[in-house]
Image (cartoon, rainbow, N blue to C red):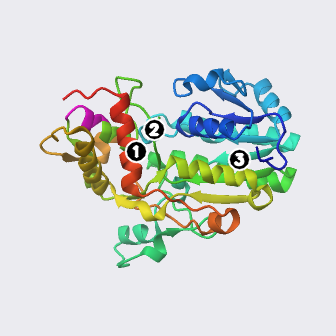
Amino acid sequence: MQELPSMNPTRIAIVGCGGFVGVHLVKQMLDLGYPVDGWDLEDRRLGELVGHKDFCFHHSDYSAPETIDDISKNHSVVIHLAALCNPSLYNTEDQRVIQSNFILPARLAEACAKEGSWLVYFSTSEVYGRTVSGVARGMGIEVGESNELDLLTEDSSPLLLGAIGSRRWNYACAKQLMERYLLALEVSSQLQWTVVRPFNFLGPEMDFIPGVDGEGVPRVMACFMDALLHGRSMELVDGGGARRCFTWIGDAIDGIIKILENPQASRGQCFNIGNPKNETDICGLAARMAGIYTQITGRDLPNPVWKNVSAESFYGPGYQDSDRRLPNVGKARALLGWEPRMTLDDTLRLTIDWFVQHYPVSH
């Protein structure tokens, strides 16, 4: 076991350990020999990890003042993953989204500042909002090919959110304000912090299938898998033209471990964790997924394979999307020696295979 510098030699705290990223991180930390204390409201993804000798699971949220005090006082490293981070909630559960992504983590950050704990905070690629070229096109300005304008860099790219009436940006705004608050606490109270900006992590255990192990509208991968598993057409919001970069969860976890193992390089830094080589538009994602699904299952695809729907009908009024999220990962490469490796097709194949193995195919 490699010693993580400045870490409590006995425990590391992970708040939101039962979610998609949390369960993969807990498993990797335990595999590396690091004991973990975790907090979450659910444990269905954790499975046998709950009984692991080096894992203490607290079946609760962390919002109570005494819990926040316990976390910050007894752990010199605190990883914050807990969040409402489903796009279907951003313009339907506004108040809860803002509380989950700013008000509650701000209290934990204040406690970490008081106790001298290092807070590793999971933000979102959505803090970047809309691209400069996307805003320009919306104003009728021609910008042509725009890779240079669109490349999102942690310390220089502007963060361009929509108007107040575009309620979809509540999540991104809360996360962005939390990042700014961390810096404010560093200045006022010497908080040690690191921010992770994830770019569309994919892998086993992500999201849910509606009516099976969750309700509502999951994120795009699970939405498309729900349709494929049930022989329905995949729904493309506004034609599926938005572009995203998808990142294998194993690559992402490697990046997080490198952050923990390099505190001097990581503290006071924001890191993009994503794979710029795995970019596709959502329509292209649907096409790739359909092809891989038929290869794995031998099942016929529905006719049509996909259909277009409006953002308002799918998510409700007040939804506005970003046109593209293309991460610059040069900082993580330079400071951490981290590089994503898994291709998009391999990422999709591994993720789709997991869904097929864990959910019934009903067509």
Amino acid marked by disc 1: Leu
Residues shaded magenta = 226-231
Which residue is under mark 3? Answer: 120
Q: In front: 29, or 166?
A: 29
User: Which of 45 and 74 lies nearest the eye of the viewer?
Assistant: 45
Q: In the displayed structure, would residue 191 be above or below residue 211?
A: below
315 magenta-colored: no
Q: Which residue is mark 2?
A: 204
* Residue 130: x %, y % from top left: 46, 61
Q: Furthest residue to the front?
A: 1
Say which label, 2 or 3, has the lower sequence index: 3
Counting residues from the start of the chain, the first of labels 2 and 1 encountered is 2
- Residue 305 drawn above or below residue 13: below
**Tag of residue 350:** 1
Q: Are marks 2 and 3 in contact (CB under 8 Å)?
A: no
Q: How many angstroms separate mark 2 from mark 3 (CA)? A: 23 Å
Q: Is residue 270 left or right of residue 248?
A: right
Q: Main secondary structure of the magenta part?
A: helix
Q: Residue at x 40, y 44 (%)?
A: 350
